[in-house]
Amino acid sequence: MTGLPGPDRRPISVLLADDEPLLRKSLRIVIDSQPDLRVAGEAATGSEAVRAARELAPDVVLMDIRMPDGDGIHATRRITADPALAAVRVVVLTMFELDEYVYGALRAGAGGFLLKDAHPEALLDAVRRVHGGEALFAPSVLKKLVEHYVTAPAAGAAKPPASSLRDRLTPRETDVLVLIARGLSNDEIAASLHLSGNTIKTHISSLLAKLHARDRAQLVIAAYRSGLATVTAE
């Protein structure tokens, strides 16, 4: 669905970071065709992406992983670690579901992952949802990311018990966290729990604060690494 900005709402600004000019041009055409989105700038290398993010302060960065002069993982880490860019969200574009670099991008603070062969509508939805505070994962990518984090946690990282995590959360916050880990959107969580969208947003804000998470992607990992959410076979 095409978004329409309100009279006092500016379009969502997007920075395109990819070393392929043809892909950047294609992305620009798709994004600029929407009244609620606009391309703020482009970058062809990781270093350029960081510089452009600092100069333009875009709402969302569409970040390729494999770029010269500082790849997308390094660029994502530098952007998410910069306090001045706390409001910037990064969506990683990857060619393959099994791209090993995707795991590093998540640790670096990426808020979403999208396959490059995704339909244009999926791309537009990703930009809007990540800008709105949601994590966005292609289902196949989410499953593999979760499996990776559950079976191969970072070296030396202790796995917090689910009971410990529950002690820090209210029962309703726990419900919301589990549904976030399953990849549900705010509207889907609200429908599942028979709550309003604003109430869900309040619970998510509380979860982010209590778990010291930058965004929903980190909430997903916290839920799975603690065992509160589990990987299910398809």
Image (cartoon, rainbow, N blue to C red):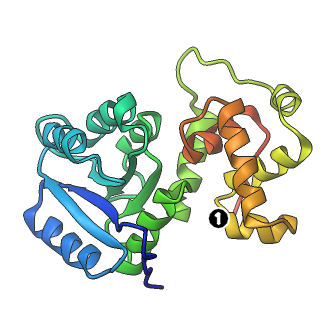
Q: For numbered disc 1, what is the local secondary structure?
A: loop
Would residue 171 be seen by someone viewing this image from the given angle?
Answer: yes
Would residue 224 be seen by someone viewing this image from the given angle?
Answer: no
Q: Residue furthest right?
A: 171
The residue sitting at 25% across, 56% down in the picture is 15
Q: Residue furthest bottom?
A: 1
The residue sitting at 87% across, 49% down in the picture is 172
The residue sitting at 23% across, 38% down in the picture is 54
**74 lies left or right of 126:** left
Residue that label 1 marks: 185
**44 lies left or right of 216:** left
User: x and y percent of residue 208 in the render?
Assistant: 65, 38
Front in this rendered view, residue 154 or 165: 165
**147 lies left or right of 87:** right
User: x and y percent of residue 126 in the render?
Assistant: 45, 66
The residue sitting at 67% across, 63% down in the picture is 186
Front in this rendered view, residue 223 or 54: 54
Determine the image quadrant of residue 116: bottom left
Estimate how packed mark 1 is, as few (under 14), some (14 to 19) or many (20 or more) residues with alpha carbons within 10 Å. Answer: some
Q: Residue furthest left?
A: 21
User: x and y percent of residue 22 in the render?
Assistant: 10, 69
- Quarter holding the C terminus is bottom right
Report the amino acid beneath label 1: Ser
Numbered marks: total: 1
Q: Residue furthest top?
A: 156
User: x and y percent of residue 145 in the render?
Assistant: 53, 47
